Image (spheres, helix red, strand yellow):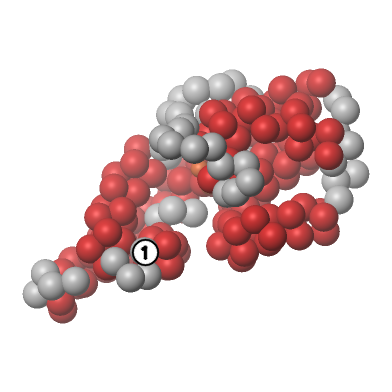
Amino acid sequence: MLDIEKMNRHLQDLGGTYILNHARRCLVIAKKLAEEENLAYDEDILTFSCYFHDISAFKPYRPEGKFDHAEESAKIVPALAAEYSINDAYKISAIEEAVRYHDKCGQGTANETKLLRNADAVDYLGFIAVARDFSKQHEEMTKAIAALKKHLAEFSALLELDSAKRMAEPRIKKLETFLREFEEETFGLY
Ligand SMILES: [Fe+2]
Ligand SMILES: [Fe+2]
């Protein structure tokens, strides 16, 4: 049984509610997708993958220089699993796969991998994407808008499951509307 309280504190200490609630939303979304698609999943694998898939983006796990955050996060999984008393080799390798491929379209075979990737993409589309990019770039609106446009393209391309596409569709429309209206209101000065 996973110690969710400890996992919550772990993420909160690493990156505040930004990362904690992203992880929790991913889990909520992944479970909704699983239900709609009738996809079976292991509770521990899905939960642990959703919680720690971005962990390498945060100190002290963050490597120096440019890095692939999904790959680096996957490398941390065995140590993290030990910290949370996950000893089952199958579960550990399934978590590694889900984390490693959470931003790599079509890669990996497990249901948990697909569920995390599609849930993660949905959580970077819509008004939540605006909040996420503006909170990261609170002094640089130009960079926030550039990131938003990049994320809209990248995360839309990661949607594979029909249920995820359905969930994302209104979010994409809202995001496109936001970008259009924002450009108009600011006369391009932001
Ligand atoms: Fe990520
Ligand atoms: Fe993520």
Amino acid bearing label 1 = Gln
Label 1 crowd (10 A; few <14 / some 14-19 / many >=20)? some
Counting from the top left corner in percent of width and height, residue 16 is at 62, 64
Q: Quadrant of the N terminus?
A: top right
Counting from the top left corner in percent of width and height, residue 6 is at 82, 55
Residue 98, quarter of the rendered image:
top right
Q: Residue at x 41, y 35 (%)?
A: 66
- Relative horizontal placement of residue 173, taking residue 127 as reference (left or right): left
Q: Quadrant of the C terminus?
A: bottom left
State the residue in front, 161 or 181.
181
Residue 93 in the image: above or below residue 29: above
State the residue in front, 113 or 141.
141
Residue 40, quarter of the rendered image:
top right
Q: Residue at x 29, y 48 (%)?
A: 150
**Quick check: can you spot residue 132?**
yes
**Quick check: can you spot residue 114?**
no
Q: Residue at x 86, y 25 (%)?
A: 88
Which residue reaches farthest front?
64
Q: On the image, numbered disc 1 is attached to which residue? A: 137
State the residue in front, 49 or 170.
49
Within 8 Å of ligand 1, the CB of disc 1?
no
- Relative horizontal placement of residue 4, taking residue 102 as reference (left or right): right
